[in-house]
Amino acid sequence: MTLMDTRVEDGYPTRITGTPEQLPRVHPTVWGTEADGPIDAATLAHHEVTGYTVDEGLLSPGEVQTYWQELVRLSSDEELRADERVITEAKTGEVRSVFDVHVLSDLIRELVHDPRVLDRARQILGSEVYIHQSRVNYMPGFKGTGFYWHSDFETWHAEDGMPSPRAVSCSIALTDNYPYNGGLMVMPGSQRTFVQCAGETPEENYKASLKDQRVGVPAEDDIMKMAAEYGIEQFTGTAGSALWFDSNIMHGSSNNITPYPRSNIFLVFNSVENELQEPFAASAPRPAFIAGRDSTPLKR
Ligand code: 6CS
Ligand code: FE
């Protein structure tokens, strides 16, 4: 401990060498109240308990078309393809994700400031907010690969220095999410448990983890226990619907062998009261395109 070690106490130790444990979340899931925004009390209560909320029809069919064309533009931009913000599928080389899309795309920047989105983020987090991470996931048909079970907060805490799980993701479906085309699975209520992960964080882990995460995934025994305690629900929804989910909810998605892509815009809002510190379990912070360090509050 240095004299001026100003970093907050690590309430969520992870990437440990011993046997991982399940720790209680000591923070609320919802920080705001009904008076703070458009979400009614019953929906807020549901989010507090389950860790997620579905907002059907956030985007109109016309808006879905507009954003879909923007995703096509981003994924077919040959110049951008060489940029480290573009992650390709290991097997096919197809675009898997594009990060920092609220910077790369004026349209998506507008969406971040849209009251239908921004006001909900502020209400759930009970404060002014800023973008921690934005991405588009393509999950192409036939060979789209999913994401193994994980808690986003476990990575954002360990590798980005996020102190507490006072962050929320908004996943906006731009294609219909069926049960069978790689839709997101969540364990409702699992955000109330922090599952430690074993294994030291390798240098520049993000270069591998964004394609196929190996470190920072829970042990099978823990997944078994969590599934027994919380169950598994599959998010399905028509294009234009949005899923708001807590940073620490256990989630994952399966591969997509159907002809139907499962593409979404993924916006992560962090509270301005939860600014990133030094990584809690990594030797160096991840680049700003994955973990934003400008906590200037977003304005409408
Ligand atoms: O490492 C990250 O920040 C990203 N990885 C996953 C699997 N989900 C959250 C986030 O986009
Ligand atoms: Fe995730």
Image (cartoon, grey):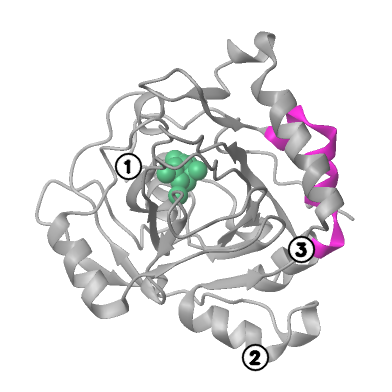
Classed neighbour count for the residue bearing mark 1: other residues with Cα under 10 Å, few (<14), some (14–19), many (≥20): many
Query: Where does residue 33 sit, x and y in percent of width and height?
Result: 70, 84
Magenta region: which residues? Answer: 101-116
Q: Determine which residue is flagged by label 3.
A: 58
Classed neighbour count for the residue bearing mark 3: other residues with Cα under 10 Å, few (<14), some (14–19), many (≥20): some
Residue sitting at the far front: 259
Query: Where does residue 203 sit, x and y in percent of width and height?
Result: 32, 24
Q: Determine which residue is flagged by label 1.
A: 281
Question: Are the residues tagged 1 and 2 within 8 Å (C-beta)?
Answer: no
Cα–Cα gap, marks 1 and 2: 37 Å
Which quadrant of the rendered structure holds the C terminus?
bottom right
Q: Quadrant of residue 60?
A: bottom right
What kind of element bears circle 1?
loop
Q: Which residue type does callout 1 highlight? A: Ala
**Circle nearer the viewer, 3 or 1:** 3
Could you tell me which residue is drawn at 36 percent across and 57 percent down?
Answer: 10
Q: Determine which residue is flagged by label 2.
A: 42
What kind of element bears circle 2?
helix
Q: Quadrant of residue 212?
A: top left
The residue closer to the viewer here, 77 or 133, is 77
Query: Where does residue 254 sit, x and y in percent of width and height?
Result: 36, 49
Query: Where does residue 70 sit, x and y in percent of width and height?
Result: 77, 33
The residue closer to the viewer here, 287 or 6, is 287
